[in-house]
């Protein structure tokens, strides 16, 4: 009887090799990118190369190729755009986020960073700030579609049960997989991702972390890198990560609530500017819904049902301290008369570049 080989990373085995002295003039750089895949959606990919210097800026690193060809383009190129410290290999080793482009440096169809960057440049003098609350589910490493720790042919106590408290919960019978969250928080801080907090969410194995405040394009870069780091950490423990907006039918959805402000909104009397933004957003609801998940709104149809603290996908609403609205203005913002608003529509699997570009084009550029 063959004993099955454990699928998770063998930490003691690996530690022996990670402890080996790395030559000073050999730096490992991991190129991280979103590959379009067969469905033309963003699939996290990465590969490493050795360079003979310590890169300080992404632009110092060479353009590389994915090694994958498509029908329409013979070579897909990787253009380094943002550099981070490598929390997996430590030392002077780096992670570098890459733009995915064609041979003539045009963005591939799933590269939303390119046009987002153009919008951010146009709105630069308005200083748009963002904070994104990323929710996710930990999944069983062997059962791709089943949450970690959930009974095999059943469900945990429903959210409405008297003894069920999962949000921000502690205790082995309430939440599972805290190691992933804790390691992720430390790894992001080390990497240079502007992570600002974490908490357990409203059902077992559902967690959330927050990235921001970041100005302009940096929010998309930091959120994308934070997702990559999360997937890699969970991989070590043979745990899957799902960013699906409705991982289990009838249970809580997962979102990526996006907090947004401009300099005018943060200044004295900024609430009037926030209310002007509500008017603009209400007129562009359909346009935003289309880019707030990767399937043109289809994913959010499962999540934004008007139930379980979600808004109704089909109509725009906003309110002060209203968590069932499309957009919430926090109570303390209304009291201070300035601050930011929270767009609660983006799905957990949204492209952060597409979401933040839409907000800037509608609220700052009046498109």
Image (cartoon, helix red, strand yellow):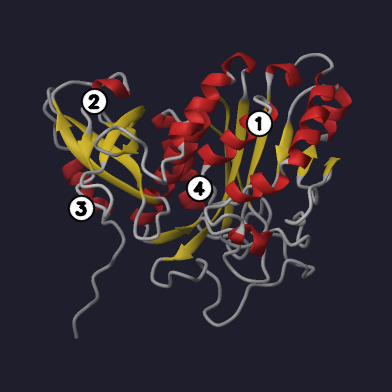
Mark 2–mark 4 distance (CA, rounded to whole Å) = 31 Å
Which numbered disc flags the more N-terminal residue, 2 or 1? 2
36 horizontally vs 17: left or right: right
* Residue 358 image point, x, y percent: 61, 37
Compared to 181, does 29 lie above or below?
A: above
Q: Residues within 10 Å of mark 2 (few under 14, many from 20)?
A: some
The residue where tag 4 is placed is: 181
Label 1 – label 3 distance at C-alpha? 56 Å
Residue 77 in which image quadrant = top left
Mark nearest the camera among 1 and 3 is 1
Residue marked by disc 2? 61
Q: CA gap, disc 2 to disc 1?
A: 36 Å
Q: Residue at x 63, y 71 (%)?
A: 249
What residue lies at 65% left-to-right and 64% top-to-bottom?
A: 302
Query: Which residue in the protein does label 3 denote?
Result: 13
Q: What is the secondary structure assignment of the residue under circle 2?
A: loop
Label total for image = 4
Sequence order check, earlier mark of 4 and 3 = 3
Residue 221 visible in the snapshot:
no
User: Horizontally, is 168 left or right of 121 in the view?
Assistant: right
Q: Secondary structure at mark 1?
A: loop
Whether residues under marks 1 and 3 lie with C-beta atoms below 8 angstroms apart, the answer is no
User: Viewer-proximal residue, 166 or 97?
Assistant: 97
CB under 8 Å between discs 4 and 3: no
245 versus 1 height, above or below: above
Apparent side of residue 39 relative to residue 72 in the rendered image (left or right): right
Q: Mark 4 touching mark 1, by CB under 8 A?
A: no
Tell me residue 287's x, y (percent). Answer: 65, 45
Along the viewing direction, whichever of 250 and 139 lies nearer the viewer: 250
């Amino acid at each position: 009887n063959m004993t099955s080989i454990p699928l998770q990373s063998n930490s003691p085995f690996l530690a022996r090799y990670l402890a080996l002295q790395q030559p000073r003039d050999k730096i490992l750089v991991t190129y991280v990118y979103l590959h379009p895949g067969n469905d033309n959606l963003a699939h996290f990919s990465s590969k490493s190369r050795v360079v003979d210097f310590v890169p300080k800026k992404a632009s110092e690193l060479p353009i590389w190729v994915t090694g994958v060809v498509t029908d329409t383009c013979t070579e897909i190129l990787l253009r380094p755009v943002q550099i981070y410290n490598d929390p997996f290999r430590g030392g002077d080793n780096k992670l570098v986020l890459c733009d995915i482009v064609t041979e003539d440096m045009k963005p591939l169809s799933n590269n939303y960073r390119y046009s987002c960057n153009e919008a951010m440049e146009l709105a630069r003098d308005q200083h748009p700030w963002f904070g994104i609350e990323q929710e996710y589910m930990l999944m069983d490493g062997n059962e791709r579609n089943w949450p970690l720790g959930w009974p095999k042919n059943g469900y945990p106590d429903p959210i409405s049960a008297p003894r069920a408290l999962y949000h921000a919960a502690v205790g082995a019978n309430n939440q599972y997989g805290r190691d992933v969250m804790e390691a992720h928080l430390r790894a992001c801080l080390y990497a240079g991702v502007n992570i600002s907090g974490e908490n357990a969410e409203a059902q077992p194995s559902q967690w959330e972390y927050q990235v921001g405040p970041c100005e302009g394009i940096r929010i998309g870069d930091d959120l994308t890198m934070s997702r990559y780091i999360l997937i890699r950490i969970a991989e070590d423990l043979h745990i899957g990560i799902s960013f699906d907006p409705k991982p289990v039918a009838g249970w809580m959805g997962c979102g990526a609530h996006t907090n947004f402000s401009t300099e005018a909104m943060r200044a004295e009397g900024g609430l009037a500017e926030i209310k002007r933004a509500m008017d603009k957003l209400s007129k562009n609801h359909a346009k935003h819904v289309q880019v707030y998940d990767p399937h043109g709104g289809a994913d959010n149809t499962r999540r934004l049902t008007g139930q379980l603290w979600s808004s109704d996908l089909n109509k725009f609403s906003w309110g002060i301290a209203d968590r069932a609205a499309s957009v919430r203005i926090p109570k303390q913002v209304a009291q201070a008369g300035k601050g930011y608003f929270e767009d609660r529509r983006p799905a957990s699997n949204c492209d952060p570049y597409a979401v933040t570009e839409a907000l800037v084009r509608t609220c700052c550029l009046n498109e």
